[in-house]
Image: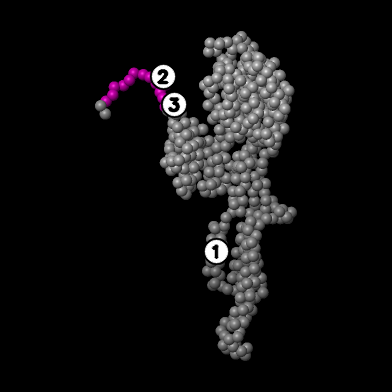
């Protein structure tokens, strides 16, 4: 329901079109000029015999006023009056955003292959990290793996799909140097966390074997933790080992128990906590809801979609009525053809008119995507038409890990593409979506199509090799497929 107070927020899409209201004045000036020329044709006492018609008769004042009002209404319709609205999104469409930068440091040393917890220390760590990704509320997260040395696998990002991809690549074979150089991993995390970030944190996922805290390595680890504290970085630790139990043997060497006290001495001064991996949801809640999520960050309430209530149709209908009324007043047979002409002009005007809300939403959708508000961006792009809108909606769905929706939108973008460059981009994004959806044969086909259109696309070539390898792995017959071979025919 609209009240008069709402019109205080009235906006015009194209205010210059209001100049169209001056048309009656222009026509009146031209009519007066032409009328003066006609009157000069003959002297006043000869005009009744020299002129036929109603040239000398003035237009009725009521008809003139209706015409002026009709042109004003047409000018208002063209200028696009609108009122701002706020449309609340459905519950759960957007979550509260917690903007901090964090680095996940994952231990991949030989001791992480122990099986004191199911299915294995490293595999269990990956499962816990995957569960953490589903809990995140806008945090930027990076990935560092370490054994005897440390390496950065992913810088802090909100692209959780890319993070999960690099997490899948984590393997003990990444490092040839044995051991657990935790000090190097913490120093690398400190270096790659943005210095300008308001809140920074490190989540260490390790089995915490005591060997990494002895001798010179222990001193280096203590210094690295002190550096984190001095830089305002909070350290949290998730221990992927059994709290109790005897030492295990892995690859011919004995694995020690986790040194919980040493880990607490590292995390405690920075304000962090230490948690053990546990069955159920308690460990995730403790390390995230009661830990990382309590750090100060930019907590934003669920965003509302900004939209417009368009008023131009009402102005257009009013203009049509004002134009038709003078025709109905005593012009009889001319009413129908003139009314049809007016209606035809109105239809053409409405068909060629671009919706102000849709034009405005295009910029708003891009701004939402640029601000990492992918849920809002996907909703706003959905209202658009054309190649750019489909690519934008697909990219927003991809960032939200809605790969089925991304496939649908990138496929639609391919159909809307106007040249080979756009088709190559759509196919490349389509291949990425198929890859993360684990449809590797379709990803291979999409990457190949992209390379056919743009042979110098190095990323598409690299992704094609990766997708082809995955497709070959799943196509290999397993042991259960072996049986009695059939007899081959000559054909």
Q: How far apart are marks 3 and 2 (CA)?
A: 14 Å
SS at mark 1 in the image = helix
Mark 3 lies on a secondary structure that is: helix
Q: At numbered mark 2, what does the secondary structure look like: helix, strand or loop?
A: helix
Is 405 a magenta residue?
no
Q: Residue at x 54, y 72 (%)?
A: 333
Residue 165 x %, y %: 54, 30
Does residue 62 appear in this view? yes
How far across and down, in percent of the image, does residue 25 sit? 65, 71
Left or right: where 428 falls relative to 132: left
User: Can you identify the residue that label 1 sits on?
Assistant: 345
Residue that protrudes farthest toward the front in the picture: 216
x 60%, y 19%: residue: 180
**Which residue: 48% across, 34% down?**
463
In the image, which residues are magenta?
473-489
Marks 3/1: CA–CA distance: 63 Å
Indicate which disc, 2 or 1, sits on the residue closer to the N terminus.
1
State whether the magenta stretch is mostly helix, strand or loop: loop
| Residue sitting farthest toward the top | 246
């Amino acid at each position: 329901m609209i009240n008069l107070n709402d019109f205080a927020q009235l906006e015009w899409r194209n205010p210059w079109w209001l100049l169209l209201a001056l048309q009656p004045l222009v026509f009146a000036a031209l009519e007066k000029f032409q009328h003066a020329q006609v009157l000069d044709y003959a002297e006043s006492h000869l005009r009744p015999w020299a002129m036929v018609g109603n040239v000398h008769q003035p237009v009725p004042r009521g008809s003139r006023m209706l015409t002026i009002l009709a042109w004003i209404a047409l000018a208002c319709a063209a200028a696009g009056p609108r009122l701002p609205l706020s449309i609340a999104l459905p519950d759960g469409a957007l979550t509260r955003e917690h903007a901090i930068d964090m680095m996940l440091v994952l231990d991949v040393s030989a001791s992480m292959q122990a099986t004191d917890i199911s299915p294995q220390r490293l595999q269990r760590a990956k499962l816990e990290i995957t569960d953490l990704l589903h809990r995140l509320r806008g945090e930027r997260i990076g990935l560092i793996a370490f054994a005897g040395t440390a390496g950065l696998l992913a810088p802090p990002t909100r692209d959780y799909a890319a993070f999960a991809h690099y997490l899948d690549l984590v393997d003990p074979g990444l490092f040839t140097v044995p051991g657990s150089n935790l000090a190097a991993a913490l120093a690398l995390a400190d270096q790659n966390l943005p210095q300008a970030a308001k809140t920074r944190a490190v989540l260490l996922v390790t089995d915490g074997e005591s060997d990494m805290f002895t001798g010179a390595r222990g001193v280096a680890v203590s210094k690295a933790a002190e550096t984190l504290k001095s830089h305002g970085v909070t350290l949290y630790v998730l221990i992927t080992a059994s709290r109790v139990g005897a030492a295990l043997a892995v690859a011919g060497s004995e694995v020690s128990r986790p040194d919980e006290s040493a880990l607490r001495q590292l995390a405690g001064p920075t304000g962090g906590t230490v948690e053990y991996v546990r069955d159920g949801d308690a460990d995730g809640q403790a390390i995230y809801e009661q830990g990382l999520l309590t750090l100060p960050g930019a907590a934003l309430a669920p965003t509302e979609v900004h939209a417009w209530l368009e008023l131009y149709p009402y102005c257009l209908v009013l203009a049509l009525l004002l134009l038709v009324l003078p025709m109905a007043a005593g012009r009889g047979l001319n009413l129908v053809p003139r009314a049809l002409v007016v209606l035809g002009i109105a239809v053409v005007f409405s068909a060629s008119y671009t919706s102000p809300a849709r034009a405005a939403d295009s910029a708003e959708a891009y701004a939402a995507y640029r601000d990492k508000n992918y849920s809002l961006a996907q909703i706003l792009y959905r209202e658009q038409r054309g190649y750019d809108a489909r690519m934008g909606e697909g990219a927003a769905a991809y960032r939200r890990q809605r790969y089925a929706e991304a496939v649908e939108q990138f496929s639609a973008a391919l159909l809307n593409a106007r040249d080979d460059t756009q088709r190559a981009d759509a196919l490349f994004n389509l291949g990425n979506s198929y890859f993360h959806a684990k449809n590797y044969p379709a990803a291979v086909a999409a990457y190949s199509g992209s390379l056919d259109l743009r042979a110098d696309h190095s990323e598409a070539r690299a992704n094609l090799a990766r997708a082809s390898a995955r497709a070959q792995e799943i196509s290999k017959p397993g042991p259960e497929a072996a049986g009695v071979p059939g007899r081959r025919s000559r054909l």
